[in-house]
Image: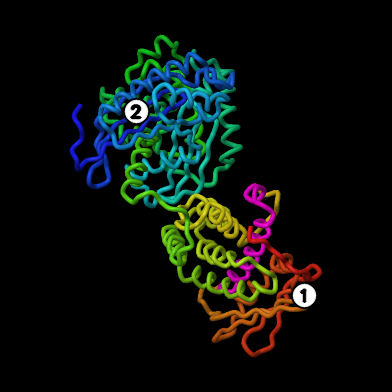
């Protein structure tokens, strides 16, 4: 192999999966894409018996290390500038997963990074965004491996939810069968097991229907390969190949009734995958039915492609520094809000009024200064959930914000912003809620306080006409008086702010009253508990 020209960069990625190990060597192009120079794949069954024993077997470890030695030698021959190797659910869940990584480093000098389910899903999504136009579509990006299934639900290119499901093809086969023909009783058992997982993680009914599923992983490519052979006699060129859920279901039932030795001879099916294809196909079929999917598009690159694209992006822009406190970090919030097609005028108005309310309450209730910026960000994003649907837009807002890349914010800050937006309407924040249960007490208190202010600010622009030009806050003796400036009577805004002030009264122990201009028209909201001072730590 010749050394790369001085002007080119070669990269390599290795995906250590539960079922197989894949390596790709690529040369970076000027437009940020890449040209594949070499690929290697071997089914080592690293996760064989893992889901019944809880450990990687000595035999599978030896097979996998022998494969990694060869792959490392190939990448060395290409003189790659960077090699990144990642492991997924098999190594992640095995009791001796770390020992395996140490042994690999010792014997072939390769450092393996065990990535989280969220990172795995993000890499699959990055690949899908590169190869498919998701604008204006409800899409499920699905990566199905041997141990797990990662599902990313998106509205356009905006992530609504991410799920990691224990529905890998190897795991399901070991637990419920599928290598040999499945009779009706065992088939029902497998199907019900998959449905229970979908109920627990995605819900019934699901948050929204996805017309398109973009699938990566060996199960998707082999199903598409078999169907493509039946259509036109070739199993090549599977990138973007479209199949219907009905075709997958019909093929799955044929395969589950076919003896393993005969199944291995099916054109388009890798013989080494014949024993796990039925369970994998069942997981895809049940998910497609649950989500109302109309079309399945195949993305063969998947995680490896996403990994290379991530490496290229890091080399292009440099390694990102720690999140900062730059003045323009709110710009990334505004960009995301526009991406979700939020009403910009309304959200800017709510953010401005919420900031003024915070300023009036900060000293009397000793609110942490960081709360103002978090409140402004939550106000700018509180309506992004409308991108999914109106009925539960506050809940969708939480997921969309949590999965957004808001530059300049720490993960903790993003979580607080998402929670404040989540509680801008309907239910009050409660410790038992899953999204709040893991937060420290001080952060839960901060969410309650900021949500209370956001509700009132949202009410003060109920007509979306920006009628209220300013709000001042006067506090004392168990009351908070909000004085509104407006050119004309903000009757509807006053009514809605009063209606939404119940949480405010509970949190601050101060009965809020509202007055418009010089007219002393006090309007009291629901009575509050005994007055108390709210002391919130910055956390």
Question: Distance of mark 2 from mark 1, alpha carbons?
Answer: 66 Å
Question: What is the span of residues highlighted in magenta in the rendered image?
Answer: 434-461
| Horizontal arrangement in the rendering, residue 189 relative to residue 216 (left or right) | right
Of label 2 and label 1, which has the lower sequence position? 2
- Residue 455 inside the magenta-drawn segment: yes
Residue at numbered disc 1: 478
Going by the picture, which residue comes out furthest to the bottom? 518
**For residue 166, what is the image quadrant?**
top right
* Horizontal and vertical percent position of residue 270: 36, 19
Q: Main secondary structure of the magenta part?
A: helix
- Residue 104 inside the magenta-drawn segment: no
Please report the residue visible at 68 percent of the width from the left and 59 percent of the height from the top. Answer: 445
Residue sitting nearer the eye, 73 or 457: 73
Residue 395 seen anywhere in this rendered image of the structure: yes
SS for callout 1:
loop
For the image, the number of numbered tags is 2
Residue 281 seen anywhere in this rendered image of the structure: no
- Check if mark 2's residue and mark 1's residue have beta carbons within 8 Å: no
Residue sitting nearer the eye, 459 or 149: 149
Estimate how packed mark 2 is, as few (under 14), some (14 to 19) or many (20 or more) residues with alpha carbons within 10 Å: many
SS for callout 2:
strand
Residue sitting nearer the eye, 349 or 534: 534
* Horizontal and vertical percent position of residue 337: 45, 61
Q: Give me the disc on residue 325.
A: none
Going by the picture, which residue comes out furthest to the top? 261
Q: Give me the disc on residue 23.
A: 2
**391 up-or-down from 349: above or below:** above
* Horizontal and vertical percent position of residue 442: 68, 57
Of marks 2 and 1, the one in the foreground: 2
Please report the residue visible at 35 percent of the width from the left and 50 percent of the height from the top. Answer: 318
């Amino acid at each position: 192999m010749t050394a790369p020209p001085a002007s080119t960069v070669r990269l390599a990625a290795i995906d250590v999966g539960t079922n197989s190990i894949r390596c790709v060597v690529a040369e970076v192009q000027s437009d940020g894409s890449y040209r594949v120079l070499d690929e290697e794949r071997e089914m080592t069954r690293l996760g064989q018996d893992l889901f019944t024993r809880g450990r990687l077997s000595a035999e599978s470890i030896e097979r996998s290390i022998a494969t990694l030695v060869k792959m490392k030698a190939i990448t060395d021959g290409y003189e790659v500038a960077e090699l990144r190797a990642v492991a997924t659910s098999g190594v992640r869940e095995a009791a001796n997963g770390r020992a395996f990584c140490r042994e690999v480093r010792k014997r072939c000098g390769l450092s393996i990074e065990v990535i989280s389910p969220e990172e795995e899903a993000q890499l699959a999504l990055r690949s899908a965004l590169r190869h498919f136009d998701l604008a204006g579509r409800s899409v499920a990006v699905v990566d199905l491996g041997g141990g797990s299934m990662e599902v990313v639900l998106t509205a356009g290119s905006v992530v609504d939810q991410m799920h990691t499901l224990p529905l890998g093809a190897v795991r399901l086969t070991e637990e419920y069968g599928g290598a040999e023909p499945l009779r009706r009783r065992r088939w029902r058992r497998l199907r019900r097991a998959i449905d229970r997982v979908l109920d627990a993680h995605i819900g019934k009914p699901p948050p929204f229907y996805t017309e398109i599923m973009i699938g990566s992983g060996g199960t998707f490519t082999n199903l598409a390969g078999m169907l493509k052979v039946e259509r036109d006699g070739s199993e090549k060129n599977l990138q973007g190949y479209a199949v219907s859920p009905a075709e997958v279901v019909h093929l799955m039932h044929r395969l589950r009734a076919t003896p393993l030795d005969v199944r291995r001879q099916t054109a388009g099916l890798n013989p080494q995958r014949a024993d796990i294809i039925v369970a994998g196909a069942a997981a895809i079929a049940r998910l497609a039915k649950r989500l109302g999917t109309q079309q399945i598009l195949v993305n063969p690159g998947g995680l490896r492609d996403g990994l290379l694209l991530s490496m290229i992006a890091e080399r292009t822009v440099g390694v990102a520094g720690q999140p900062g406190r730059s003045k323009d970090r709110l710009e990334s919030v505004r960009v995301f809000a526009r991406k979700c097609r939020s009403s910009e005028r309304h959200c800017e108005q709510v953010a401005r009024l919420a900031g003024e309310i915070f300023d009036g309450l900060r000293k009397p209730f000793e609110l942490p200064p960081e709360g103002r910026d978090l409140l402004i960000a939550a106000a700018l994003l509180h309506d992004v959930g409308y991108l999914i649907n109106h009925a539960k837009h506050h809940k969708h807002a939480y997921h969309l914000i949590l999965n957004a890349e808001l530059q300049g914010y720490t993960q903790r800050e993003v979580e607080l912003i998402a929670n404040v937006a989540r509680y801008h309407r309907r239910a009050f924040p409660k410790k038992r809620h899953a999204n709040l249960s893991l937060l420290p007490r001080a952060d839960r208190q901060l969410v309650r306080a900021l949500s209370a202010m956001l509700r009132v600010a949202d009410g003060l622009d109920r007509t979306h006409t920006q009628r209220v030009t300013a709000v001042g806050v006067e506090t004392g003796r168990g009351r908070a008086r909000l004085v509104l400036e407006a050119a004309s009577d903000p009757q509807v805004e006053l009514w809605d702010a009063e209606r939404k002030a119940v949480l405010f009264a509970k949190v601050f122990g101060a009965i809020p009253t509202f007055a418009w201009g010089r007219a002393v028209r006090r309007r009291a909201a629901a009575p509050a508990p005994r007055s108390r001072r709210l002391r919130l730590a910055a956390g």
